[in-house]
Image (tube, rainbow, N blue to C red):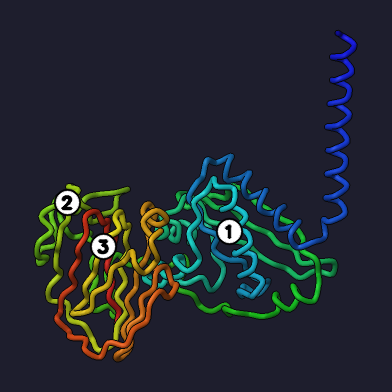
Amino acid sequence: MNKIIIAVLIFITISCSTQQISANVSQNESNNTFSYNINVIANQLIDGLNNGGYKRIAILTFYDIDNNQTNLSKLLVEELTTKLFMTKKFVLIERNLINSLLEEQSMNLSGNIDEETSVSIGKILGVEAVVVGTTILLNDGIKVNARLISAETGELISVASSSLPKNNQLTTMLSTITNKSTVSSISHNSTIKSGSSNSDFYFEDFSSTEEGMLPGNWIGGSTLMVKKVNAKSVLSTFKGKKHNFTIPEVNFPENFKLSFYLKNNDNDLKITVGNLSFGVSQLNGNKFHSSQSNELFILELVKDKSIFKVFINGKEKKMIRFSEFKHDNTIEFKSSNCYIDKIVGKYL
């Protein structure tokens, strides 16, 4: 009996050793591929995130040696976002949502992002950590360095690094600049606006509304109140009943973009702007509730003359021609459980 057990143990040991050696040989043979090196960077970032206990993250961008963003920057962000998302351990903010949120604060990702700026961006995006990085063309490859930074303290959590193969495709992508470095609104001297700007015709973030109340001129909303969530004022329901409320005296310009920052917890949210109505869940299909209910998303209505477009997180969902639009100067909500973070109207 003992001989059998020893034989089995020897077999298992040999098998495991063989598999490990085989795996190492396979990695050595493919360590100059794009996919292999992306996995190396992703695994290093995952280790840093796990060690720090971070769950909500945003992968911002990668810069070349001149602080420009390139097509390779976009590819790296997309690939790393996919790799980290596939672990099912992290909540990642979509690139389009990042751009929209920063745009509303008159911020952008041009120019280098330091630790101080990372804190500012992290607070806007509501994440715990951000990833930024650089790409450098060398004689033997394209060096990629990534930094994982705490969005709370600005401290460097961990780093990741690897070298991509220097082939024609990746070299061309690195040389194709998509966002040239400029004097950016993101700097040590920059300030994050807590209110509206000159480009806004409407702005409400509930910061001036007393907790437990509604903005002074709003009509209806008997089951709604402003409350503090993570030190930020938001509008939320305190009863699970259907409710209607109206925002009066909204002076719509001829052309505009109206952005709603929402968490939709039902399938019947309906928004009416002037005399144009649309059901939010219908824009994203029947799975809208299950896929979006726990995450902040941005719904945008863009009017350009008689053409209206509706976007969710920067992706166009609907376009119509509506020449009968009337500036009724109201925005109406019909819902049973909708969390509103902010509403911003901008001139176009």
Q: Amino acid at mark 3?
A: Leu
Residue lying at 28% horizontally and 80% vertically, measured from the top left:
198
Which of the numbered marks, if any, corresponds to residue 241? 2
Which of the numbered marks, if any, corresponds to residue 81? 1
For mark 1, give the secondary structure: helix
Q: Amino acid at mark 2?
A: Lys
What's the distance in space between the residues labelled 2 and 1, CA to CA? 38 Å
Whether residue 139 is visible, yes or no, is yes
Assess disc 3: are there few (<14), some (14-19) or many (≥20) residues with their C-alpha within 10 Å of its C-alpha: some
Percent across and percent down for residue 10 are 88, 22
- Mark found first going from the N terminus, 2 or 1: 1
- Report which quarter residue 192 is drawn in: bottom left
Assess disc 1: are there few (<14), some (14-19) or many (≥20) residues with their C-alpha within 10 Å of its C-alpha: many
Q: Nearer the viewer, residue 203 or 321?
A: 321
Percent across and percent down for residue 20 are 83, 38
- Mark found first going from the N terminus, 3 or 2: 2
- Mark found first going from the N terminus, 1 or 3: 1
What's the distance in space between the residues labelled 3 and 2, CA to CA? 12 Å
- Report which quarter residue 285 is drawn in: bottom left
Q: How many marks?
A: 3
Assess disc 2: are there few (<14), some (14-19) or many (≥20) residues with their C-alpha within 10 Å of its C-alpha: few
Identify the residue under disc 3: 269
For mark 3, give the secondary structure: loop
The label nearer to you, 2 versus 1, is 2
What's the distance in space between the residues labelled 1 and 3, CA to CA? 30 Å
Q: Nearer the viewer, residue 124 or 170?
A: 170
